[in-house]
Amino acid sequence: MNEMTQLERLRSEIPRPDLADLRAQEERLLAAIADPAPVRRLERAGMRPRTVRRLRLSFAAGLAAAAVAAGVVVVAVDSEPGAPPTLHMMPVKAEMVLTRAAENATMFPELHPKPGQFLVFESQTMDTVGGSSTFLARSKRKVWLPVEGDSTGGFIESEELAPSAYPGWPLPPEAWENLGHRGPKKLGDFDDRVEYLRTDFAYLSRLPTEPAKMYQHLYTGLTHGAEADAEAWDRVGDMLAEAYLPAAQRAALFRAAAAIPGVTTVGKAVDAAGRTGIAAARVNPWLGVRDEYIFDRETYRYLGVRSVVVDADQAKAPVGSVLTSSALLKVSVADQAPAVNGH
């Protein structure tokens, strides 16, 4: 039995307080953590730094235990040497989806792609097409991506499906253009992303398996604050969409994602293929949407992602409208890329 399962069982008989109580408890705990006065008094009294650090950790652990009793989950993330760990607190329901997904990461058959092979992603998508004619484009796609993420690039085959109207807008005639089958064709060879944003298997399989270090990876190159949190949440999605992580890194990613401030749970979410699941979500206030990562309600296997309007003025669409969505249908390994049309 791992630590998270023990925590879940420990709090199973504790009545859930209402949201106002949770917020009040969280504010008191954060205020106590932020107060350095007790520790500074010990340092001025001549106590050795190592002993002071132990007391800091004990203090944090005591607050964590109090938080569990209050119906709050605490995730500790390593800070600078000599400083206490950073504690992120979330209501139990907010972290449940990602924690369960982490616990179940080893339940599914594992892929073991080798150099020279391709990971094949089959999905169904819906995306907003902007410009003078705005509508929702729908497609099924199959993408071959090299395991090493090298300059050979990837390949794509797609079937453009009947479009949908953008909420509140008429469906323009040009939305019906270019329907039908396309490809296989080569994707662009040039990838100008920095090293830490790579999503090929060779890179992802070398990422940390410890949640705290994975959390630090998500924030690489970012400063603290709301914009950094939004970007970190987007990076989680980049590592889930058409990317494959070994189970250990996948579990670490889910636990790290649960520690990003602002994460909530959506009890019902439907992916682009019509599968209903439960989602871990976070609101992007600059776009007026809630970005949801959807998981199977029973197995907690990742299903897909969608963006739902929460601010009509920002998104230019009614609240509750789905503007983008995808469903990851299958991931497999191929020894070679498909034959490109005409070659």
Image (tube, rainbow, N blue to C red):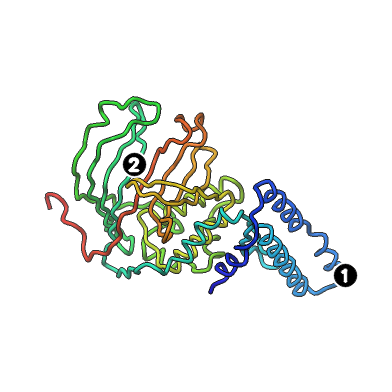
Q: Is residue 8 above or below residue 133?
A: below
Q: Is residue 17 above or below residue 115?
A: above
Q: Which residue is mark 2?
A: 126
Image x and y of residue 83, in percent: 70, 64
> Which mark's residue is nearer the viewer, 1 or 2?
2
Q: Say which amino acid is labelled 1.
A: Ala
Q: Say which amino acid is labelled 2.
A: Met
Image x and y of residue 229, in percent: 56, 49
Rendered residue at 47%/49% (across/down): 234
8 on left or right of 252: right
Secondary structure state at the residue bearing disc 2: strand
Q: Earlier in the sequence, mark 1 or mark 2?
A: 1
The front one of 343 and 337 is 337
For the residues marked 1 and 2, what is the alpha-carbon distance in whole angstroms?
63 Å
- Specify the farthest residue to the right: 45
The front one of 169 and 233 is 169
Q: Is residue 229 above or below residue 59?
A: above
Rendered residue at 61%/54% (across/down): 90
73 on left or right of 39: left
Secondary structure state at the residue bearing disc 1: loop
